[in-house]
Amino acid sequence: NVILALSLNLINGFTGLFSLGHAGFMAVGAYTCAILTMSPDQKEANYVLQPIVPWLANVQIPFVPALLLGGVIAGFIGWLLGVVALRLRDDYLAIATLGFSEIIRVVLTNLQTVTNGSLGLKGLPRFTTMWWAWGSAIVVTLFLVLLIKSSYGRAFKAIRDNEIAAESMGVNVFGMKVLSFTISSFLAGIAGGLLAHYLTTIDPKQFIFLKTFDILLIVVIGGIGSITGSVVAAIVVTVAMEALRFLDGPL
């Protein structure tokens, strides 16, 4: 959640865009990492309705390359979406990214021979330990701090404050928006891969639009455009959600 909050804050807080597509990028990273790390025997046991496509059946790579590849594919899809959708603004951009996130979920549900459809993937190896989770969160936090302090970060904030003034000062507004969106999508894909190998089971229902609103809640509570606030709010909200889980049960 720390990684997710920071990545969404890069778009919403520092670049001034309103995106609601994070759950979709999480799903891409989660499924990519999960499929690439599963052994052929695990794939055969999971894909009971239809066998997995032959070109993925015997593919198995270590966790770290699979995690990075999941982030890269999510980032590439984010780049494609950014090129198309970032010409929109405000509520229109939010609606477009939300719709795209739902499209990803529907594709994952219906792509039976690749994602196992609505049955999801079970019995994944549990690679994500607390060391991995917190280590990744610390690395991402340091990366975001350095990015925001760089010339790219200043360009992002200039676009947030006034696009016309930023463009008049030589900032490539559209290019910087796409870059911000791509980096954010990459980080969301990394978070999705970590989540998949922590829960050891994933299915498309985990990545509905309400997941994006959970992340947005953390960003708003922590403060738009605040790295420290996102980290603290992610910890507080996550602990609170687990502590209050008993309220979902019968009285």
Image (spheres, rainbow, N blue to C red):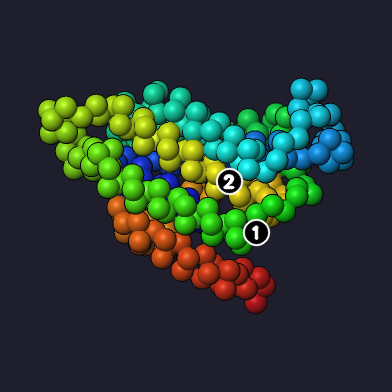
Q: Nearer the viewer, mark 1 or mark 2?
A: 1
- Horizontally, residue 118 falls left or right of residue 84, namely right
Q: In the image, what residue occupies the spot 39% across and 24% down?
A: 83
Query: Is the residue 129 above or below the residue 91 in the image?
Result: below
Along the line of sight, the residue nearer the viewer: 220 or 103: 220
Task: For the residues labelled 1 and 2, say whether their Cβ atoms are less than 8 Å apart.
Answer: no
User: First in sequence: mark 1 or mark 2?
Assistant: 1
Q: Is residue 4 visible?
A: yes
Q: Which residue is mark 2?
A: 192
Q: Quadrant of residue 249?
A: bottom right
- Name the element at disc 2: helix
Q: Which numbered dot is residue 129? A: 1
Q: Position of residue 178 (x, y in %)?
A: 36, 30
Q: Position of residue 7 (x, y in %)?
A: 42, 47
Q: Is residue 98 visible?
A: no
- Near mark 2 (Cα within 10 A), the count class, few <14, some 14-19 or many ≥20, is many
Q: Position of residue 59 (x, y in %)?
A: 76, 30
- Name the element at disc 1: loop
Q: In the image, what residue occupies the spot 16% across and 38% down?
A: 162
In the picture, the quarter occupied by the C terminus is: bottom right
- Near mark 1 (Cα within 10 A), the count class, few <14, some 14-19 or many ≥20, is few
How far apart are labels 1 and 2 at the CA level?
Answer: 14 Å
Picture mark count: 2
Kind of residue at disc 2: Gly
